[in-house]
């Protein structure tokens, strides 16, 4: 991730949000699990967990227990 000031989980959530809004992650697609997301972004899986929570808080994804985390239709900005 970048060296800018701020929380790493927020930077990851911003990146994923940008991918969702640009259509690179279409509605209904499944996000990688926290461990894989951590490897993808070079962060700890706890940080990935917090990024996913941030995405849920933003209304961009939903997590279904034992199924995974899926992209929702993004709310208007």
Image (cartoon, helix red, strand yellow):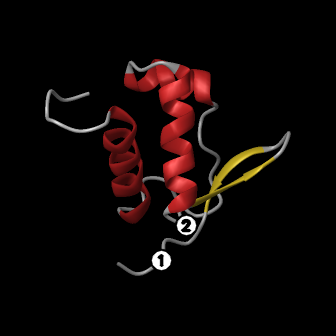
Residue 36 left/right relative to 1: right
Local SS, label 1: loop
**Residue 66, above or below 41:** below
When asked about the image quadrant of residue 42, the answer is top left
**Residue 76, above or below 13:** below
User: Which residue does the image show at 56% across and 47% down from the upper left?
Assistant: 53
**Residue 73, above or below 27:** below
User: Which residue does the image show at 48% across and 18% down from the upper left?
Assistant: 44
Q: Label 2: few (<14), some or many (≥20) within 10 Å?
A: some
Outermost left residue = 4
Where does residue 33 sit, x and y in percent of width and height? Answer: 64, 31
Mark pair 1, 2: CA separation: 7 Å
User: How many discs appear?
Assistant: 2
Q: Label 1: few (<14), some or many (≥20) within 10 Å?
A: few
Where does residue 68 sit, x and y in percent of width and height? Answer: 74, 43
Disc ID at residue 39:
none
Residue 55 left/right relative to 29: left
Which of pointers 1 and 2 lies earlier in the amino acid sequence? 2
Split into 4 quadrants, where in the image is the N terminus? Answer: top left
Local SS, label 2: loop
Split into 4 quadrants, where in the image is the C terminus? Answer: bottom left
User: Which residue does the image show at 55% across and 25% down from the upper left?
Assistant: 46
Is 27 or 6 nearer to us in this picture? 6
Which residue, given by chain and number where applicable, does mark 2 sit on? Answer: 59
Q: Are marks 1 and 2 in contact (CB under 8 Å)?
A: yes
Where does residue 28 sit, x and y in percent of width and height? Answer: 65, 60
Outermost bottom residue = 76
Where does residue 54 sit, x and y in percent of width and height? Answer: 49, 51
Is 17 or 4 nearer to us in this picture? 4
Is 51 or 42 nearer to us in this picture? 51
Disc ID at residue 75:
1
């Amino acid at each position: 991730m970048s060296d800018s000031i701020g929380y790493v989980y927020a930077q990851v959530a911003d990146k994923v949000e940008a991918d969702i809004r640009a259509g690179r992650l279409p509605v209904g697609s499944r996000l990688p699990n926290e461990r894989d997301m951590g490897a993808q972004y070079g962060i700890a899986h706890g940080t990935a967990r917090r990024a996913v929570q941030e995405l849920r808080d933003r209304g961009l994804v939903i997590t279904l227990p034992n199924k995974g985390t899926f992209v929702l239709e993004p709310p208007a900005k």
